[in-house]
């Protein structure tokens, strides 16, 4: 069973506007995420827009789609993955030194049964896959930090 919430955060020494610029350009997602290989927004990035994505784990590739459910400039970006029902979000908060970014994977209502079946049979089970997701979140946030602080 999926954990209701997975989360990571980082403090970045750059203004919120710079961090938002990087995060809200979803074409950058493959630069940040160890698992994402492509994220294409259909139309303009905004609430309601759809994306087509390609993910990779080792030799395994799989496509997903999502819908942006929150797009609040310089505050929050969230999208719901159609195939499993999870919501991924990035929340930005100004700090004295710059910006705090919190990345969250929400699965409070669980994930779709097919997703659990595939994770169990192809990805080593839910606990190890979720540990990998949190490690990926931390890697993503570190990469965003490096880019924003350049």
Image (cartoon, rainbow, N blue to C red):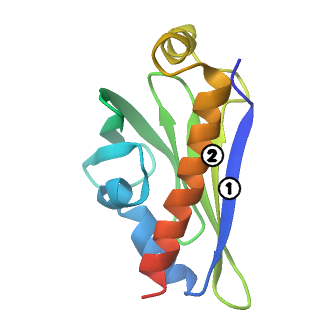
Residue 138, how many percent across, how many down? 59, 57
Q: Does 100 appear above or below 34?
A: below
The answer, for residue 21, to whether it is visible in the render is yes
Query: Residue 134 — which label?
Result: 2
Is 112 in front, or is 67? 112
Is label 1 in a helix, a strand or a loop? strand
Q: Are marks 1 and 2 in contact (CB under 8 Å)?
A: yes
Query: Residue 98 — which label?
Result: none
Q: Is residue 88 left or right of residue 67?
A: right
Residue 99, how many percent across, how many down? 63, 79
Picture quarter with the N terminus: top right
Q: Is residue 1 left or right of residue 13?
A: right
Quarter of the image for residue 120 reads top right
Q: Residue at x 55, y 64 (%)?
A: 141
Residue 108, how many percent across, how many down? 73, 29
Is label 2 in a helix, a strand or a loop? helix
Quarter of the image for residue 107 reads top right
Picture quarter with the C terminus: bottom left
Q: Residue at x 41, y 71 (%)?
A: 22
- Which label's residue is closer to the chain start, 1 or 2? 1
Q: Residue beneath label 1, please?
A: 8
Other residues around mark 2 within 10 Å, as few (<14) / some (14–19) / many (≥20): some
Q: Residue at x 51, y 36 (%)?
A: 80
Is 45 in front, or is 96? 96
What distance separates the C-alpha of mark 1 from that of mark 2? 7 Å
Residue 132, how many percent across, how many down? 57, 39
């Amino acid at each position: 069973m999926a954990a209701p919430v997975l989360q990571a955060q980082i403090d970045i020494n750059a203004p919120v506007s710079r961090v938002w610029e990087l995060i809200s350009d979803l074409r950058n997602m493959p630069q940040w995420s160890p698992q994402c290989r492509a994220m294409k927004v259909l139309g303009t990035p905004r609430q309601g827009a759809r994306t087509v994505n390609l993910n990779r784990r080792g030799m395994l590739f799989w496509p997903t789609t999502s819908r942006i459910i929150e797009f609040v400039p310089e505050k929050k970006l969230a999208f719901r993955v159609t195939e499993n029902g999870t919501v991924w979000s990035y929340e930005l908060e100004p700090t004295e030194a710059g910006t705090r970014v919190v990345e969250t994977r929400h699965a409070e209502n669980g994930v779709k049964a097919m997703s659990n079946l595939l994770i169990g049979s192809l990805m080593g089970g839910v606990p190890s896959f979720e540990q990998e997701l949190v490690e990926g979140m931390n890697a993503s946030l570190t990469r965003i930090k490096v880019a924003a602080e350049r």
